[in-house]
Amino acid sequence: MQHSNWICPQCGLPDISGDRVQCPRCGKKRNRWGYWDCASCQTKSIRADHKECPNCGRPRARNVKFYLRDDLVEFVDEVSGQNAVRINRPNWICPYCNQQNDDAVDVCVYCNAARTESKERYHDVETPQQTPPAQTFPKVQRKKDRTTLVCCLLVLIPFVLFFGFAAILAIWQSVSSKKVRTATEYETYWTSTVFIEEFRTFEDSDWELPADARLIRTAEEDYTYIDHYERRSREVWVDDDDDDDWDNDDWGGGWDDGGWDDGGWADYGDGQFGVFRIPTLICGAKAPSLITLRYETEYYDEPVYATVPRTKYYYEYDAWVDSRTVTANGTPGTEPYYESFSLEENERERTREIRWYVDFQHDDEPVTIELSKAEYDRISGGSELRYRCDVTDGFDNPQYILADDQG
């Protein structure tokens, strides 16, 4: 997505790069157009500078919600119409206080001097260079040092608390997971299950007729497929954390996970969105943003689809699917067996299985552990059950493990 160069409407600086959203001379920010939807005819993505729907002519509602599009970036053209005249008639300089005033005012907003006495324009006057003070007072330096110390503490304290808590939690989880616990009240039992399938007929459709299918009917329908790929571009975030130039103003919005991230744009409520930076505390005299919101153009291949008429087949087919189970259960001392049953004409037995379990209470919560046949025989009839509660994956996801030594 390429953007044309622009002229700053505030200071008149020409030929500013189209990927910059702030004037490098006066700091004037460049806004981005939002869009709105017509509630009357449902027309979508109407640019915010349209006060009426171009389709039905209904005026835009006062409480309309503006939004940003994922596939289009249109900057506000601040040098069109009356604004273009303002740039041809630049700001003027007050002869009494040397302050810059907008061309639209005839009285200095700083000292109330009349514009008629001014003979200088802003573009004709060389912007004076700001010279640093000749002397740095110790008191100011101490203030900066204190600010740096406070910034360091504000950054380090949360990290220390976080990692300290994480270390304590990890130790607690390790100790808790290795602890062998006992349950004096528990129940062991076995279950047997027979899985039964049923032969059923289903209907489906596809662009090809399967070999084992029975055709019901055909129909000419639209078939959509990928015809080719086209080279496209989109705006993506660029991480400038490694850039030492903290005055880099090439920042704006960007793509994130396939869609435009509105986090880099502030909604002004009038159809325009302005960029902003995410502030953070950095140890040092300067406090640049944690993320410099700058974007670059990324190219990718987007599929282009085509639609043609094609024959679609509607058919039926037969398949075996799970339909029901026959179960039985018993306690220690009872030899596992399978419940008797009879098959219907369209049924068959798929498989059989026997499983062993133990139920008990852990912190007043019911727990079930599946056992092997050897473990089932080993703990059945014992005086107590010994187990571990592994919370390595978190206390909200405990794993119960039978201990090797059983009393």
Image: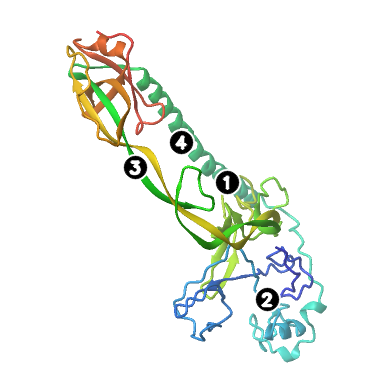
User: Is the residue 374 above or below the residue 160 in the image?
Assistant: above
| Circle 4 residue | 161
Q: Quadrant of residue 275?
A: bottom right
Mark 3 against mark 1, which lies toward the viewer? Answer: 3
Report whether residue 93 is seen. no
Task: Check disc 1 and report its element: helix, strand or loop.
Answer: helix
Instruction: Say which quadrant the N terminus sits in.
Output: bottom right
Disc 2 to disc 3: CB gap under 8 Å? no
Mark 1 against mark 2, which lies toward the viewer? Answer: 2
Q: Position of residue 184 (x, y in %)?
A: 18, 16
> Callout 2: 10 Å neighbours few (<14), some, many (20+)?
some
Q: Earlier in the sequence, mark 3 or mark 1?
A: 1
- Tell me how far mark 3 sits from mark 4, CA to CA: 62 Å
Mark 3 against mark 4, which lies toward the viewer? Answer: 3
Task: Check disc 3 and report its element: helix, strand or loop.
Answer: strand
Which residue shows up at 56% across the image and 66% down it? 68
| Circle 1 residue | 146
Q: Earlier in the sequence, mark 2 or mark 3?
A: 2
Between 343 and 215, the residue placed more toward the observer is 215
What amino acid is found at the position of numbered circle 4 in the picture?
Leu
- Tell me how far mark 1 sits from mark 4, CA to CA: 22 Å
| The label number, if any, that marks residue 77 in the structure image | 2
What amino acid is found at the position of numbered circle 2 in the picture?
Asp
> Callout 1: 10 Å neighbours few (<14), some, many (20+)?
few
